[in-house]
Amino acid sequence: MAVGGFDLESAAMKAMKTKHACGPERDPEFFEDVDKLFAKYPEAAGRYAVTCRRLELEILKIDFSKQVGVTRIDDGRIITEFYDRDDDIVRSAHHACCEWPQDDDGHCHKICPE
């Protein structure tokens, strides 16, 4: 069925055959364990979420060992811009870490307003 020149059936079939970039469909065992962890700590679970970092890693090619996301709120939008860790904006920002990596590099990956 075509809508506005767009073939919905072809798009749906392509989406079904495409490997998911992230999420429970891609990593079901991981998400099963995350669900168990969130259930074990329901109060803390409300403060956190699992996010896909495909945009940062594959599209923007962010190297978190050299760069950090600096987040700000602007006119009702949450905006994250990436800067080199030694940039004056990063050093002068009055922010707190709001994204912790799983790896052992010790670097915060995103800082947010306090």
Image: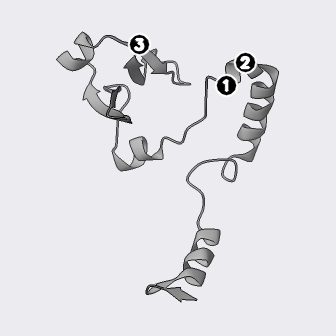
User: Distance from label 3 to label 1 (Cα)?
Assistant: 18 Å
Residue 17 lies, with reference to residue 34, above or below; the image says below
Residue ID at (61%, 32%) = 49
User: Distance from label 3 to label 2 (Cα)?
Assistant: 20 Å
Residue 82 seen anywhere in this rendered image of the structure = yes
The N terminus sits in image quarter: bottom right
Residue 61 position in % (x across, y down): 34, 43
Using the image as rendered, state which of residue 48 and residue 62 is in the foreground.
48
Residue ID at (42%, 46%) = 55
Residue 78 position in % (x across, y down): 39, 34
Residue 24 lies, with reference to residue 42, above or below; the image says below
Asked if disc 1 and disc 2 are in contact, CB closer than 8 Å, the reply is: yes
Assess disc 1: are there few (<14), some (14-19) or many (≥20) residues with their C-alpha within 10 Å of its C-alpha. few
**Most distant residue in the left direction:** 88
Q: Quadrant of residue 38?
A: top right
Kindly identify which residue carries mark 3: 114
Q: Secondary structure at mark 2?
A: helix
User: Distance from label 1 to label 2 (Cα)?
Assistant: 6 Å
Residue 36 position in % (x across, y down): 81, 30
Which tag, 3 or 1, sits closer to the chain's start? 1
Kindly identify which residue carries mark 2: 43
Asked if disc 3 and disc 1 are in contact, CB closer than 8 Å, the reply is: no
Kindly identify which residue carries mark 1: 46
Using the image as rendered, state which of residue 106 and residue 80 is in the foreground.
80
